[in-house]
Image (cartoon, rainbow, N blue to C red):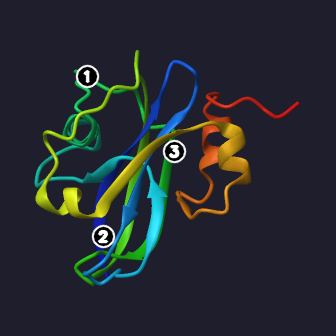
């Protein structure tokens, strides 16, 4: 199986909420599936994870940064792409704190406009109690380990 390297972003608001996009597939290999996930995407040829994180942040949110800190997590998971291809996703997660929650869709591809149905800034409590499918599946623990979300009292 092909490895698909991807940079994923943990975009954190001033009120310590994390940005997730809702993906809703209607007419591709994932038709009928819906889930929430972090912004991010695959590396382009010759691109580093850090460079992909900066590029993907801009393309999916309109937020521009010149660099990102070291990744806070790695993940390897088998998945099916919308094209139907089975891959092993090799992901690195980067935290970006933003000064406000304004986003732009101006750089979205046609595919992103089609499948990215919504966005929402999630609190730790909302993530802990949601019945929605959220990727990565250990997002709350990942954010707690990174010091973004605090342990419940």
Task: Give whichever of discs 2 and 1 has the lower sequence position.
Answer: 2
Q: Residue at x 61, y 28 (%)?
A: 148
30, above or below 57, in the image: below
Q: Residue 34 appears in which quarter of the rendering?
A: bottom left
| Cα distance between the residues tagged 3 and 1 | 20 Å
Q: What secondary structure is found at the residue carrying circle 2?
A: strand
Q: Which residue is mark 1?
A: 65
In this picture, residue 15 sits left or right of residue 77: right
Label 3 crowd bin: few (<14), some (14–19), many (20+), radius 10 Å: some
Which marked residue is nearer to the observer: mark 2 or mark 1?
1
Q: Nearer the viewer, residue 90 or 152?
A: 152
Q: Which residue is mark 2?
A: 3
Q: Which residue is mark 3?
A: 73
Task: Give whichever of discs 3 and 2 has the lower sequence position.
Answer: 2
Task: Give whichever of discs 3 and 1 has the lower sequence position.
Answer: 1
Q: Residue at x 21, y 37 (%)?
A: 51
Q: Residue at x 59, y 60 (%)?
A: 137
Q: Which quadrant is home to the C terminus?
A: top right
Q: Residue 64 appears in which quarter of the rendering?
A: top left
| Cα distance between the residues tagged 3 and 2 | 17 Å
Q: Is residue 141 visible?
A: no
């Amino acid at each position: 199986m092909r490895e698909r390297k991807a940079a994923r972003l943990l975009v954190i608001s001033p009120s310590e909420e994390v940005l997730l996009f809702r993906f809703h597939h209607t007419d591709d290999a994932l038709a009928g599936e819906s889930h929430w996930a972090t912004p991010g995407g695959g590396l382009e040829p010759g691109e580093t994870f850090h460079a992909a994180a900066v590029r993907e942040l801009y393309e999916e949110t309109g937020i521009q940064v010149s660099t990102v800190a070291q990744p806070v997590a790695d993940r390897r998971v088998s998945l099916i792409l919308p094209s139907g291809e089975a891959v092993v996703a090799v992901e690195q997660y980067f935290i970006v704190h933003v000064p406000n929650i304004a986003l732009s869709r101006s750089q979205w591809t046609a595919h992103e406009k089609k499948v990215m149905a919504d966005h929402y800034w999630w609190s730790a409590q909302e993530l802990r109690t949601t019945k929605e499918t959220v990727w990565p599946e250990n997002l709350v623990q990942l954010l707690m380990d990174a010091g973004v979300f605090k342990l419940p009292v």
